[in-house]
C-alpha cells in the first residue's frame, strides 16, 4: 500500500450539494486517483467536509477531497430481486448498463421495465445497443466476496482472498461447483506481474483435483497466448485450437469472457470486449463435458496472478461476433437469430414486433427472431461527465450514472441523464466511482508491472 494519506487528510471544500450519512457504515475499500487504497468504512459525503472515511487505525474519521477519490468498493452488496423475468440487456452510450424488458420504442423514446422503475423513459439516441435473450438473464455467481464455497487444492495457502480478489500464492487449483447445466458465460478480470500460466477447466465434474477419467474442456491461458483442449473420458486430450493475444505483452491486466455453447459445441473468447476466437468441437457426440464446475489452476510463482470480478451466468447460446466489431455506425443494425441482419432506422417496437425503415421498405420483425439491436452513433462522440456525477455498480454487472443528491443509509436518490429522478436501496450498490472524466495514471499500461499485491504471510 502506498503511504500517501498524510497529504490527503484535509477538510474538503467542494461544490457538492449531496449529503451522505449512514447509521451503519458499510465496510469496504477506498481507492484514490493515484492508485492508493485504504480499508475502512464510508461514513458520509457532504457539501462542507467531502468524503468521510473511518479507518480502524485512526482516532477520528479521515476527511478526503472528492477530487482525489477514484472509487469506493463495498465488501458486500445485496442481490437485486426482480419481480419479472428480464429478457434484455441495455447498453447506453455513457457506459451505463441495465437489464430489464422493453415496454415500447417510438418517437425517439425508449420505455423500459427495470428493477428500479416499472416504466422508465429514456431518449433512444442515448442507447448504444440492446441484447435480447429468449431464456432471460440468470446470474449464477458474482464475486468473490470470500473463500466460502470454493475448494483449494492440496495447499490451503496457495490461493488467498483479499479485497474482492483471489491471489495465487504458488501452483495449485481453485474450484467451485456452479451447477452448470446448459450454455453459460464466464467473465473475470486477470492481473499479472510477469510471465504466467493459468488453466481453466470448464464443466468439471471434480473441482478439488484433476481427473482425466471425466470429460471437460481445458483452456490454457499464458502471456500472449491461449489454447483449448477437449478432455474426454477414455479418449484422452485433443487440441481444438490456439491463438495469440499480442495486447497482453503491453498490459498487466485484462477482462476475459468465455462463452460456452453446449448446443453448438463451441467455445468463444473475448478479451476486453474484443472477439478473439471461436473453437468448435466437431467430434461425434457434440459437447462432451458433463459437470457443473469451473477450476482455475495457477502455475506461477507466488503473488504473480490476481483474479477478480468473476461472473458466471446462464446463456442462450446466441453468438454474433460481428456485432462487437466492424459494424457500420451511421445506421441501426438489427441482428437476427438466423445470422441475417437488417440495416436502417428502428422506428418502433411494440406488441412483440420491431419496425425497421430500410431504403426499400418498412419491415415488421418479431422480437423472438432478434438477438441484438445496435443503434447508429458518431465515431468521434465523446461523453463528458459533470463533476458531481458518480457511477454506481450493482450485482449482476449493472451500472448507473447519476448526480448524487441523497444517501442517508436507507435510500440513494439522484438524477440520471437517461432516466431522470431515481432512487434505490444503497445496500444494493457494490461500487461507487467518482471523477468519471479522470482515470488512474497509466491505467492501460504496465511498464513497471506494479500491481500492489498484498504481502502473504
Image (spheres, grey):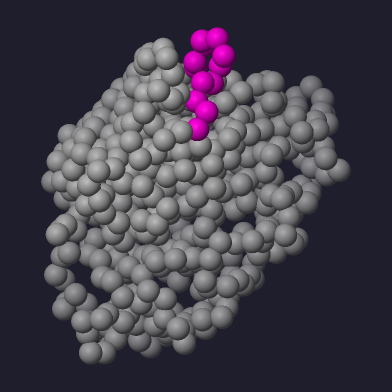
Residue 67: horizontal and vertical position, in percent? 32, 71
Instruction: Determine whether 56 is above or below 1 in the image.
Output: below
Residue 22 locus on image (x, y percent): 46, 84
Residue 161 pos. (x, y %)? 30, 56
Q: Quadrant of residue 272?
A: top left
In the displayed structure, would residue 369 be above or below residue 22? above
Q: Is residue 62 above or below residue 403?
A: below
Q: Nearer the viewer, residue 115 or 148?
A: 148
Identify the residue at image location x=53%, y=66%: 78
Closest to the observer: 144 or 389? Answer: 144
Residue extent of the magenta highlight:
280-291
Q: Residue at x 83, y 44 (%)?
A: 350
Q: Is residue 139 left or right of residue 61?
A: right
Prevailing secondary structure class for the magenta stretch in the rendered image? loop
Q: Is residue 214 visible?
A: yes
Count of numbered marks: 0
Residue 127 in sight here? no
The part of the image, by quadrant, that contains residue 262 is top right
Residue 288 sits inside the magenta stretch: yes
Image quadrant where one finds the N terminus:
bottom left
Q: For residue 348: magenta?
A: no
- Residue 453 location, x and y as percent? 20, 54
Amino acid at each position: 500500500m502506498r503511504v500517501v494519506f498524510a497529504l490527503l487528510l484535509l477538510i474538503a471544500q467542494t461544490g457538492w450539494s449531496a449529503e451522505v450519512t449512514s447509521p451503519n457504515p458499510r465496510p469496504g475499500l477506498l481507492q484514490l486517483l493515484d492508485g492508493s487504497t485504504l480499508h475502512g468504512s464510508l461514513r458520509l459525503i457532504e457539501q462542507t467536509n467531502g468524503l468521510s472515511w473511518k479507518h480502524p487505525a485512526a482516532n477520528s474519521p479521515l476527511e478526503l477531497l472528492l477530487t482525489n477519490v477514484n472509487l469506493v468498493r463495498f465488501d458486500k452488496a445485496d442481490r437485486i430481486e426482480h419481480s419479472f423475468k428480464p429478457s434484455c440487456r441495455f447498453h447506453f452510450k455513457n457506459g451505463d448498463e441495465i437489464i430489464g424488458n422493453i415496454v415500447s420504442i417510438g418517437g425517439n423514446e425508449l420505455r423500459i421495465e427495470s428493477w428500479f422503475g416499472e416504466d422508465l423513459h429514456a431518449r433512444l439516441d442515448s442507447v448504444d445497443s440492446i441484447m435480447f435473450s429468449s431464456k432471460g438473464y440468470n446470474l449464477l455467481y458474482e464475486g468473490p466476496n470470500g473463500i466460502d464455497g470454493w475448494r483449494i487444492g492440496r495447499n490451503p495457502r496457495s490461493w488467498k482472498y483479499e479485497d474482492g480478489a483471489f491471489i495465487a500464492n504458488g501452483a495449485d487449483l481453485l474450484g467451485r461447483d456452479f451447477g452448470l447445466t446448459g450454455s453459460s458465460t464466464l467473465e473475470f478480470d486477470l492481473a499479472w506481474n510477469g510471465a504466467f500460466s493459468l488453466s481453466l477447466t470448464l464443466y468439471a465434474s471434480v473441482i478439488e483435483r484433476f481427473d482425466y477419467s471425466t470429460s471437460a474442456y481445458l483452456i490454457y491461458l499464458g502471456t500472449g497466448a491461449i489454447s483449448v483442449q477437449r478432455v474426454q473420458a477414455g479418449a484422452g486430450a485433443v487440441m481444438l485450437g490456439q491463438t495469440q493475444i499480442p495486447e497482453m505483452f503491453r498490459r498487466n491486466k485484462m477482462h476475459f469472457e468465455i462463452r460456452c455453447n453446449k448446443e453448438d459445441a463451441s467455445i468463444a473468447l473475448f478479451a476486453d470486449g474484443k472477439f478473439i476466437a471461436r473453437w468448435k468441437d466437431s467430434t461425434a457426440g457434440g459437447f462432451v463435458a458433463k459437470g457443473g464446475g469451473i477450476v482455475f489452476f495457477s502455475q506461477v510463482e507466488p503473488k504473480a496472478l490476481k483474479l477478480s470480478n468473476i461472473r458466471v451466468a446462464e446463456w442462450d447460446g446466441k453468438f454474433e461476433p460481428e456485432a462487437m466489431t466492424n459494424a457500420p455506425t451511421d445506421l441501426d443494425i438489427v441482428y437476427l437469430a438466423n445470422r441475417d441482419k437488417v440495416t436502417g432506422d428502428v422506428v418502433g417496437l411494440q406488441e412483440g414486433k420491431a419496425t425497421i425503415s430500410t431504403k426499400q421498405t418498412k419491415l415488421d420483425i418479431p422480437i423472438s427472431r432478434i438477438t441484438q439491436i445496435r443503434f447508429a452513433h458518431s465515431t468521434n462522440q465523446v461523453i463528458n461527465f459533470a463533476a458531481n456525477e458518480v457511477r454506481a455498480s450493482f450485482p449482476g454487472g449493472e451500472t448507473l450514472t447519476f448526480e448524487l443528491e441523497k444517501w442517508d443509509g436507507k435510500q440513494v436518490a439522484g438524477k440520471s441523464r437517461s432516466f431522470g429522478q431515481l432512487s434505490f436501496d444503497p445496500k444494493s450498490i457494490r461500487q461507487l466511482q467518482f471523477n468519471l472524466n479522470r482515470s488512474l495514471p497509466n491505467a492501460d499500461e504496465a511498464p513497471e508491472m506494479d500491481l500492489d499485491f498484498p504481502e502473504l504471510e
